[in-house]
Amino acid sequence: MGFLLSNYQLTICILLYSLIFCFSSSSAHLCHNDESTTLLQFKQSFSFNCSACNCYRNGLYTDNWKEGTDCCAWDGITCDNTTAHVTGLDLNCKCLYGTIHPNSSLFNLVHLQHLDLSYNNFNHSQILPSFGRFTNLTHLDLSVSYLSGPIQGNRELTGKLASFINGTLRHLRHLGSLDLSEIDLTGELPNSIGQLVYLEELHLSDCNLFGTIPTSLGNLTRLIWLALRGNKLINGQFPSSIGHLKNLERLHLGDCNFSGTIPRWLTNLTRLTLLDLSYNNFEGPIPQLFSNFLQRQSIDFSNNQLTGPISSSITGLPNLHYLGLGSNSINGTIPSSLFHLANFSQLRAIDFSNNQLTGPISSSITGLPNLQSLYLGSNSINGTIPPSLFHLVNLTYLDLSSNNLSETVELDSFAKLEYLDSLDLSDSGLSLTTTNPTPSSFRNIRTLRLSSCNINKISEFLKTRMELLEVLDLSNNHLNEELNPLCNLHSLKTLDLSNNQLTGLIPTCLGNFNGNLTWLNLQRNNFHGSIPQTLGYASMLQELDISHNGLQGVLPRSLANCTNLEILNLGHNFIEDAFPFWLENLPQLKIIVLRDNKFHGPIEQPRKRLAFTNLHIIDMSHNEFTGTLPSEYFESMHSMMMDYEDKSSLNYMGVGYGYYSVTIMNKGLEMTLVRIITIFKAVDFSHNKFDGKIPISIGILKALRVLNFSRNGFTGPIPLSLSNLTELESLGLSQNKLSGEIPQQLTSLTFLEVFDVSQNNLTGIIPRGRQFETFSNTSYEGNLGLCGFPLSKNCGNVQIAESPTLPSSFSHNFKFKFDGFGWEAVLMGYGCGVLLGLLIGNCIIRRKEEWLVRIFGVKMCQHGKRSKKVWKKIAHAKSIINCL
């Protein structure tokens, strides 16, 4: 009996102890009050603005961040099970907008081990030394958060990153993961990076790093993931210190400016699953590294300068998912061994585009049943398409464009690939027929590019409602029907039907495509009638090209609603209207082509202070414009003033769906710019009825490459300010009424290839030197008063007049405005007064040289030499006279 009682008492004691333990454990999980208050204060210091954050999802705070509740249960908060201190703060993509100040409550959470503030917008706050207070931190992610390095300054202050690593990170000795991607650190990766020996992940992509990768990086032997992509490091050999990182699994070094050959010691990194060396300057043959890459899942050598054939020894990579060799100079045929299932059983994507590959597509391609993406565009592949290609049932992206295939293929054959998302057969050499139309074809297609495929008819499936189709390119075919059947394609963002024989009116439905339409190209067809007002409803429109048609009427004012418009090409139609000054309200406009229409009347003063600030090209030639040119327009064309753009790399105008193109007159020839380089700037007002003087403000547009004012009625001298156009390659002033001499200063235009001042009233000696030694007689014919090389007319003993200089006040901020008077009137009075003074002074100086001593403080030399100070004043006066 006593035994039973003791067991009963023991049971009661155990239960009581368990209850006490449970209560104590639950109380240990309650958030500390000070940390709860700290978190709420941190939240309240920001606003929530998802549109300002570069976030891949919208993740606002949930309602459980409330005062009086346990913060350990709040979203994004992790607490220690024993101490209940906040150890994890994950605010990734929480739409935070504001500034992190030095006294931010964030830095009171000293027990943090995991901190993720990525994909928010901290308004370019500095990465503060206070981050060093988190001494227990193992994970720090500040990527894509609009932060900047701790030191603001120029490139000589290379210590933004060094300061952060030496000052802040040296306290974070337990750090295992660091992500500062897309933060402006502006510095050289310091040797001290090697002190963070616990790092397993280091992400410093797109941080504006420069210099070399330090050898101390090899000390980070625990690294599993290293990403330095998008930093312009010193052009040199690949850093061998990376070869010591035996545990590396993912290596991202794309777009880092490396050169030389791809090193063989990469085979030492036997655990690599991803290797990205794309967008560098590696050269030589494709390295024979693949036999050692058994674990590789992704290999990207694209956009380099690799040469030679693809070796048939590339085998035995059963885990490889992606093989990228695009945009190199690889030649030869595609080895059939590449398509054997035993060698590449998991291969899902192949990119061999933009190389020099030849030969046919192997019929053994069916050996890759998991293939989803095949990019073979821009090569010289020939032959026919093997039927086995249509057995790749998982294919979603297929690019065979710009090849030499020779076959007539039924378009519906490609419809067998029911999962196709993108199909590009443009310029492939294929001829496509649609003899067996199936309206349900391509039900998953989003991008369909069939340019130059000898298509005679719009396929039936395109006349049905296709909810997913966003890009349709049927350009350069033989279509000769009306467009109304395409009005069901409501999801279109890009529509290119250029270079066909399409007829009828432009459908009004094109402006009603759910507001998604960004690119509309209908040039070189047979459309007639007026431009529909509904095009102004396409508020997202960025390119509108309806040139080379038979369009009439006026330009619809509704286009003023297209505030995203960048290119407007109306050339070669019969549009009859006044100058569309309301285009000033389109802030993104870069190209205006009104060429060869019936535009008429004067170009009046701009309605707004800054008009056409982003213009790169304006072509108003072959119209009936009259009157003088308002100088204010040129004074606000800021994009044409910028002569400091980076010319080391080629950047082209365009959007995500392709590049802009335009046909212009350049250097006396009509040429089509298939891609428009951003540094190309052109003004063409030729073949109109403009009169008056050429505005001297044209000299502000220092980035101009082409300037054509020919075939007008301009009078007066050639402005001296043209000598400021140091990038100018073509200058056309022919068939006007210009008078005076050709300014000697134009010899400073060292890029000038075409110079035409023929059929004017110019006089005097033709300048000599530099580019002027290359121009022929035709550049000057029709000017009876000109003499000298290259004309046969000798100038005798006439000496070249001293070249006047531009006024020192002529600058980027060019203004000639005076209260009560226009600048022309003031300068005319000033110029006449100076001229009269010089004439009288010349007579007096011959008799009383000492007067000059009193006035200018110098004495004339007997050999006719004058001091620099006198010459400067006289030249200044001459330049003003010549500008009139």
Image (spheres, rainbow, N blue to C red):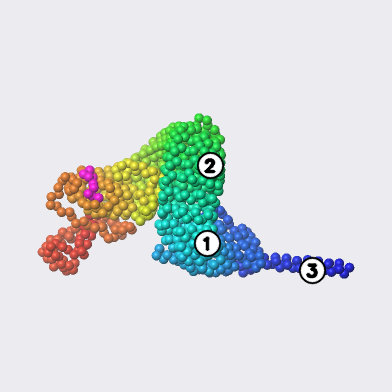
Q: Which residue lies furthest to the right in this view?
A: 1
Horizontal and vertical percent position of residue 808: 27, 60
Examine the rendering and report whether any part of residue 361 can be seen: yes
In the rendered view, tell whether residue 440 sits above or below residue 568.
Answer: above
Tag 3: amino acid: Cys
Tag 1: amino acid: Thr
Tag 3 near tag 1, CB within 8 Å: no
Q: Nearer the viewer, mark 3 or mark 2?
A: 2
Q: Dot 1 surroundings within 10 Å: few (below 14), some, or many (20 or more)?
A: some
Q: For the point 12% across and 65% down, which residue is it?
A: 848
> Which portion, as a residue range, is magenta?
771-779
Of callouts 3 and 1, which one flags the residue occurring earlier in the amino acid sequence? 3
Q: Nearer the viewer, residue 291 or 162?
A: 291
Q: Which of 136 and 862 is in front in this view?
A: 136
Q: Mark 1 points at which residue?
A: 221
Residue 584 within the magenta-colored segment of the rendering = no
Q: Which of 207 and 494 is in front in this view?
A: 207
Q: Which of marks 3 and 1 is in front?
A: 1
Q: For the point 29% across and 58% down, which residue is it?
A: 810
Most frequent secondary structure within the magenta stretch: helix
In the figure, is residue 25 to the left or right of 771? right
Of callouts 3 and 2, which one flags the residue occurring earlier in the amino acid sequence? 3
Q: Which residue lies furthest to the top in this view?
A: 435
